[in-house]
Image (cartoon, rainbow, N blue to C red):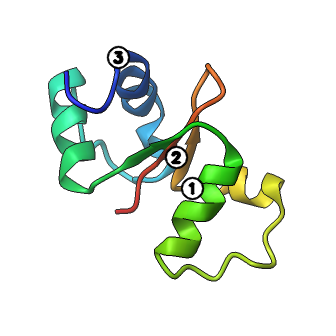
Amino acid sequence: MGEYDEMCLEYFLANQSQLFDEKVAGNLEEAEEFLEDCMAVVCKNLKEVRAYFKEEGADIAQMSDDDLEDASEVFALPDGRYLVVEA
């Protein structure tokens, strides 16, 4: 697998409805292709998530860490990392 490990792919597959109204992936391979296509990033902590959004020009200055973690494009992985998917 590429940049996304199995945990990322399985978590995204199981929780994709957090961001999308209908399924965008039906299996791990489709999940990986989708994440690659939209250039999703894996961040090791919320500090990296915040840095990513700042780099992208998003106005997140007023957002608390809880707000950031609750954003629909931020998937909190079971191991403490974050998957950021911008559709």
Figure disc tally = 3
x, y (%) of residue 67? 77, 60
Q: Which residue was labeled with disc 1?
A: 72
Identity of the residue drawn at 61% across and 21% down: 78
Name the front one of labels 1 and 3: 3
| In the displayed structure image, the side of residue 37 where residue 80 appears, left or right | right
Q: Is residue 83 above or below residue 78?
A: below
Mark earlier in primary sequence (1, 3): 3
Mark earlier in primary sequence (2, 1): 2
x, y (%) of residue 10? 38, 21
Q: Is residue 56 above or below residue 24?
A: below
State which quadrant residue 30 falls in. top left
Depth check, front residue: 3 or 85: 3
Q: Which residue was labeled with disc 3?
A: 6
Q: CA distance from mark 1 to mark 3?
A: 21 Å
Identity of the residue drawn at 71% across and 58% down: 68
Q: Amino acid at mark 1?
A: Ser
Cβ atoms under marks 2 and 1 closer than 8 Å:
yes
Q: Is residue 58 above or below residue 14?
A: below
Name the front one of labels 3 and 2: 3
Q: Secondary structure at mark 1?
A: loop
State which quadrant residue 14 falls in. top left
x, y (%) of residue 29? 15, 25
The quarter of the rendered structure image containing the C terminus is: bottom left
The quarter of the rendered structure image containing the N terminus is: top left
Identity of the residue drawn at 78% across and 70% down: 63
Q: Which residue was labeled with disc 2?
A: 18
Q: CA distance from mark 2 to mark 1?
A: 6 Å
State which quadrant residue 61 falls in. bottom right
| Crowding near the residue tagged with mark 1, few <14, some 14–19, many ≥20 C-alpha atoms within 10 Å | some
Q: Is residue 64 above or below residue 22?
A: below
Q: Amino acid at mark 2?
A: Gln
